[in-house]
Amino acid sequence: MKIAVNTRLLINQKMEGIQWFTFETLRRITQAHPEHSFYFIFDRPYQAEFIFSKNVIPLILSPQARHPFLFYVWFHCRIPKLLKKHKIDIFVSPDGFLPLKSSIPTLAVIHDINFEHQTKGIPFLVAHYYKHYFPKYARLATKIATVSEFSKSDIVKKYSIDPQKISVVHNGINESFVPISEMEKEVVRAAYSNGKPFFVFVGSLHPRKNLCNLLKAFDQYKKTDTSQTQLLVVGATLFKTKEIFRTHKTMAYSNEVHLCGHLYANELHRVLSSAKALAYVSHFEGFGIPIVEAFACDTPVITSNTSSMPEVAGEAALYVDPNSVEEIADALKKMDNETVRAHFISLGRIQKTKFSWSKTALLLWDNMEALLSKMEQKQK
């Protein structure tokens, strides 16, 4: 059978949540099913590392879909013609976008609908496009996969979708994320935090990630800190970052906050493994991959008591109200205690066993196989 996949987000050096989901699942699925042909549809020249096996046929389709107008052209005008030309049996979209003018079975992976709750920080036209089209995509999709029970419930309630149509396919953990030696940690601290212990935030610089409150809380924590602890902010700038940089500039301890930008997975692993704790106090997440990656690195986690984060972290995290600077500061202080840290590290080792990219790929393939079975029955 012929399976077309929207792979427009597979771009080297720009790998984050949805990109890692796409990469890790498709790598396993294509290699495990040589009996099928997978047509990977890119919107720009692709890297050879994304062609995982001989049964992957890469196609480049212009224009580059990075603006709402071009989203429309690419998905609703160009994709349907390509699907018809190559006689595709099913279409899979890891970022949830679907062609409205195609009648073939579709699987949409809708990771979350944060734009329905957190419009701040999303460009007006992008937010308008998402709010207009994602309800249509959700209703059009033959099947939907999403990354948490929270997101499933959110999609069902917001878009009035039959819950039987939606499968939960949790994210996994990069297999290279493992604990490192104390000697390696010293090297990392020397490179990133002037040799001092540090907390780390991982994620794009965006209002939804709640960096302003984290920075204010770190300033408050530093008033009583005796260990010269630093804060590393790891992630690329996204939208509406002026308030974040303004808050950073006005901090009393701004010189102890290090804006590291985006780090490749191998370097991110070393930084995350060396941290005193991950401070991941986002307002809203469909999953929150850094949480489980921290567990894999034996790094304790501070996270929010909202959206999907309690589902993902279980009992293995120290929870805070993301709107409370005082609670976040208090949680940072608690992580100074080695007994507290050891407690959450131990719980994290248990919680991490619930997640793997192999499990994710198998569950996603189950959804794809269900669509293929329907196609085969129709052809008979």
Image (spheres, rainbow, N blue to C red):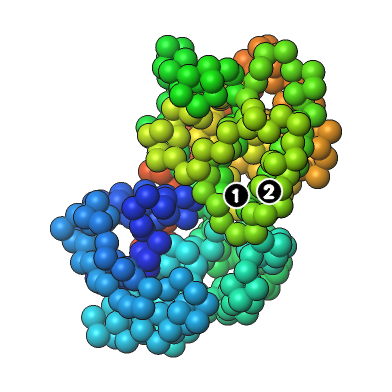
What is the spatial separation of the Cα atoms under label 2 and label 1, in whole angstroms? 8 Å
Q: Is residue 311 above or below residue 26?
A: above
Residue 108, image x and y in percent? 48, 68
Answer whether labels 2 and 1 touch (C-beta < 8 Å): yes
User: In the picture, residue 198 is in which quadrant?
Assistant: top right
- Please indicate whether residue 58 sits to the left or right of residue 152 in the image: left
Q: In this view, does 256 lie above or below 131?
A: above
Pick the quarter of the image with the C terminus. Answer: bottom left
Question: From the viewer's perspective, is residue 208 above or below residue 254?
Answer: below
Q: Residue at x 71, y 29 (%)?
A: 253
Mark 2 or mark 1, which is nearer to you?
Answer: 2
Depth order, front residue of 167/119: 119
Secondary structure of residue under mark 2: helix
Residue 349 seen from this side: no
Q: Which amino acid does label 1 sit on?
A: Leu
Q: Where does residue 87 sit, x and y in percent of width and height?
A: 25, 82
- Foreground pick, 209 / 205: 205
Residue 258 visible to the viewer: yes
**Disc 2 crowd, CA 10 A, few/some/many (<14, 14-19, 20+):** some
- SS for callout 1: loop
Of 73 and 90, nearer the camera is 73
Which residue has dot 2 on it? 244
Residue drawn at 84 percent across, 33 percent down: 326
Q: Earlier in the sequence, mark 2 or mark 1?
A: 1
Q: Mark 1 points at which residue?
A: 205
Residue appearing at x 50%, y 20% in the figure: 189
Dot 2 amino acid type: Ile
Q: Residue 338 carries which label?
A: none
